[in-house]
Image: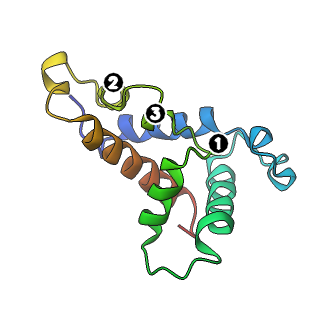
C-alpha cells in the first residue's frame, strides 16, 4: 500500500485530472485552447471555472476546499467526478494507493469519496497558485 503523499500517488492523481479534463464537454469556449499537456495550465483553467461557478458570487464563508467539494458533488465535467455517482470510490482509491482487497475494507464509500476529493484538491492546489 502506498501513502497518499507518495510521488506515485501524486502522479496518479495528476494523470487522473489530465485524463478527465475535457473543456469542450463543458461548453466554455475560453477553455478550449488550454494546453492540455501542461498541468499548471489545466489546474488554472479548473480553478477559473470553479471560481466563476461557485466562489465569485457566493456570500457563504466556506474554505476553497469546501467550495471545491460541493462543486465536485454536482458532477462538474471539468474534472472527472464520476466516483461520486457512477463508479466505486473505494476501488478508485484502492487503485491509486495500490491496496489489497483486505486494505480496501478500511474505507466506506463516503470516506473514499472524501479522500479522493481531498487528493484532487491538493494536486490542483499545488499546480495552481490561486487554489
Q: Residues within 10 Å of mark 1 (few under 14, many from 20)?
A: some
Q: Position of residue 125 (x, y in %)?
A: 49, 60
Secondary structure beneath dot 1 equals: loop
Q: Disc 2 designates what residue?
A: 91
**Label 2, label 3: how many angstroms apart (C-alpha)?**
13 Å
Q: Position of residue 105 (x, y in %)?
A: 15, 26
Q: Is residue 131 above or below residue 29?
A: below
Q: Residues within 10 Å of mark 2 (few under 14, many from 20)?
A: some
Q: Is residue 33 above or below residue 86?
A: below
- Display coloring: rainbow
Residue found at x 56% / y 44%: 75
Q: Earlier in the sequence, mark 2 or mark 3?
A: 3
Q: Disc 3 designates what residue?
A: 85
Secondary structure beneath dot 3 equals: loop
Give 58 or 7, whichever is nearer the viewer: 58
Q: Residues within 10 Å of mark 3 (few under 14, many from 20)?
A: few
Residue found at x 36% / y 37%: 9
**Label 3, label 1: how many angstroms apart (C-alpha)?**
13 Å
Residue 91 visible in image: yes
Which quadrant of the rendered structure holds the N terminus? top left
Q: Earlier in the sequence, mark 2 or mark 1?
A: 1
Q: Earlier in the sequence, mark 3 or mark 1?
A: 1
Residue found at x 87% / y 51%: 29
Numbered disc total: 3
**Label 2, label 1: how many angstroms apart (C-alpha)?**
21 Å
Relative to 125, 3 lies left or right: left
Secondary structure beneath dot 2 equals: helix
Relative to 72, 106 lies left or right: left
Q: Which mark is residue 77?
A: 1
Amino acid at each position: 500500500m502506498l501513502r497518499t503523499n507518495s510521488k506515485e500517488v501524486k502522479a496518479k492523481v495528476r494523470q487522473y485530472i489530465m485524463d478527465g479534463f475535457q473543456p469542450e464537454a463543458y461548453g466554455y469556449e475560453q477553455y478550449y485552447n488550454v494546453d492540455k499537456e501542461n498541468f499548471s495550465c489545466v489546474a488554472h483553467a479548473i480553478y477559473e471555472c470553479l471560481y466563476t461557478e461557485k466562489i465569485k458570487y457566493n456570500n457563504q464563508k466556506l474554505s476553497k476546499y469546501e467550495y471545491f467539494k460541493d462543486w465536485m458533488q454536482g458532477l462538474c465535467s471539468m474534472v472527472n467526478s464520476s466516483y461520486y455517482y457512477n463508479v466505486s470510490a473505494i476501488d478508485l482509491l484502492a487503485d491509486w494507493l495500490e491496496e489489497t482487497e483486505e486494505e480496501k475494507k478500511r474505507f466506506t464509500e463516503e470516506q473514499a469519496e472524501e479522500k479522493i476529493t481531498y487528493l484532487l484538491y491538493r494536486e490542483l492546489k499545488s499546480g495552481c497558485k490561486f487554489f
